[in-house]
Every structure is written in structure tokens, then in C-alpha cells.
Image (tube, rainbow, N blue to C red):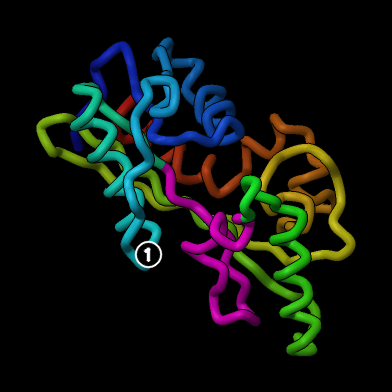
């Protein structure tokens, strides 16, 4: 495992919610975090059909273009009754001509489950794959996940993405209702981050 010894880390995202979450997780290490969007980098085309492949594309592109180490997160929700969909297409299901509409995406998921008459509990997993890449091409990969079930109607206006319909196992609040600090402590991204920090930062 390669240790992270730089002062600045590029987060390969244009998603403000994701940047805020990652910056909070890295705050204790005194690392300056800057997004690919802030550096004016394009979003590379994600051509893989799995989280790890797309995480690699984003991290290596940002590291190469910026000359700095870059961290990417490819994450999504996989619904068991939908054969693992939307999976790597989690954000695509929210695309509209005017930007991403996650309320619409959550409705789409629920409508598909209703059409299938999927039995309760309607189980799902949030997945996160982190890739930390250096300009010389070296990479480290970390995988995290959290299991739960989907609820309807959606609940809560905290979090982002599909959080308001995801109820983690053993909890009474969705990720959309939960205090952000609590969510950050147990999310799929937090699980992957613990592995990253143990290997490269601590």
C-alpha cells in the first residue's frame, strides 16, 4: 500500500454533495481538498459496467490532468428485486434535460418495484468504490457497502441522491432523515473511507 504524503488531494467529482461528504471525512488529516470541477477538468466518459472500472477512469484522468493525487468515488444503489439496477447507472436514472432529478429517479425505482409486485422488504445495497490514483499511474482501490431496504413515500430532506428512500438495516431513520454526522459514520462511503484511511493516511 502506498501512503499519501501530499498536502492537496483532487476529488474527481462535479457533485457538490459528494465533495462536501469527502471533505468532511478527510478534515482530520489537514489535507486540502479541491474538486475536479473547481480545477475546470472535464468529466471523463464512464464506459465500464462496474463501480471499480468507473472509479479508475475518473481518478486516473483527474490525476493525469492535474498532476496531483486524485480520489474518485463511484457509487450507487443496487436493488435486489431489480437484478442489481440501477447500480452503476444510479445517476443516469436521474438525468433530465435540465440536470439530475433524484426525486424522479426514486419514483422510477419504486414504480418498477410496484410493477413487479416485489415482495417486502424491498432490499437494497448502497455501494461505494474509492480509487486513489497518483500521476505516475499507481492506484489503491477500496470497497464499502451498507445494506438496507427501500421505503415509500420518500422520507427526509437531508443527504442527497437516493438517501430519502433508503433505510439502513437496524435503523428507524432513512439516510434522508438522519443527522449527517451519523450517516457519515455508517454509510457505504464511510465504510470504504475507513479502509482507505487505515491503508494510506493513518
Whether 94 is among the magenta residues is yes
Residue 198 percent across, percent down from the top left? 37, 34
Q: Quadrant of the C terminus?
A: top left
Find residue 185 and report its image quarter.
top right
Query: In the rendered view of the protein, which quadrant contains the N terminus?
Result: top left
In the image, 8: left or right of 18?
left
Q: Quadrant of residue 200?
A: top left
Which of 174 and 56 lies nearest the eye of the viewer?
Answer: 56
Pinpoint residue 199: horizontal percent, then vertical percent: 30, 35
Query: Residue 133 location in percent, x, y?
Result: 24, 36
Count residues near mark 1 (Cα–Cα under 10 Å), then give few for <14, some for 14-19, many for 20+: some
In the displayed structure, does residue 15 sit left or right of residue 129?
right
Residue at 63 percent of width and 56 percent of height:
94
Magenta segment: 73-95
Residue 17: name its quadrant.
top right
Q: Residue furthest left?
A: 136
The answer to whether one can see residue 5 in this image is yes
Residue 32 in magenta stretch: no
Image spot of residue 102 (x, y percent): 70, 52
Q: What residue sits right under mark 1 in the picture? A: 50
Q: Is residue 170 visible?
A: no
Residue at horizontal 49 percent and vertical 15 percent from the top:
28
Amino acid at each position: 500500500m502506498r501512503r499519501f504524503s501530499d498536502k492537496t488531494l483532487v476529488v474527481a467529482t462535479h457533485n457538490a454533495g459528494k465533495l462536501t461528504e469527502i471533505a468532511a471525512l478527510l478534515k482530520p488529516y489537514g489535507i486540502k481538498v479541491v474538486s475536479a470541477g473547481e480545477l475546470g477538468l472535464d468529466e471523463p466518459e464512464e464506459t465500464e459496467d462496474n463501480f471499480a472500472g468507473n472509479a479508475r477512469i475518473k481518478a486516473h484522468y483527474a490525476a493525469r490532468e492535474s498532476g496531483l493525487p486524485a480520489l474518485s468515488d463511484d457509487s450507487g444503489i443496487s436493488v435486489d428485486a431489480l437484478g442489481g439496477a440501477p447500480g452503476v447507472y444510479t445517476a443516469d436514472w436521474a438525468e433530465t434535460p435540465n440536470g439530475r432529478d433524484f426525486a424522479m429517479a426514486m419514483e422510477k425505482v419504486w414504480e418498477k418495484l410496484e410493477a413487479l409486485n416485489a415482495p417486502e422488504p424491498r432490499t437494497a445495497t448502497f455501494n461505494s468504490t474509492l480509487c486513489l490514483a497518483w500521476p505516475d499511474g499507481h492506484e489503491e482501490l477500496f470497497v464499502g457497502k451498507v445494506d438496507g431496504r427501500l421505503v415509500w413515500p420518500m422520507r427526509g430532506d437531508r443527504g442527497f441522491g437516493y438517501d430519502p428512500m433508503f433505510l439502513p438495516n437496524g435503523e428507524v431513520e432513512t439516510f434522508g432523515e438522519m443527522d449527517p454526522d451519523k450517516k457519515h459514520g455508517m454509510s457505504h462511503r464511510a465504510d470504504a473511507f475507513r479502509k482507505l484511511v487505515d491503508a494510506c493516511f493513518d
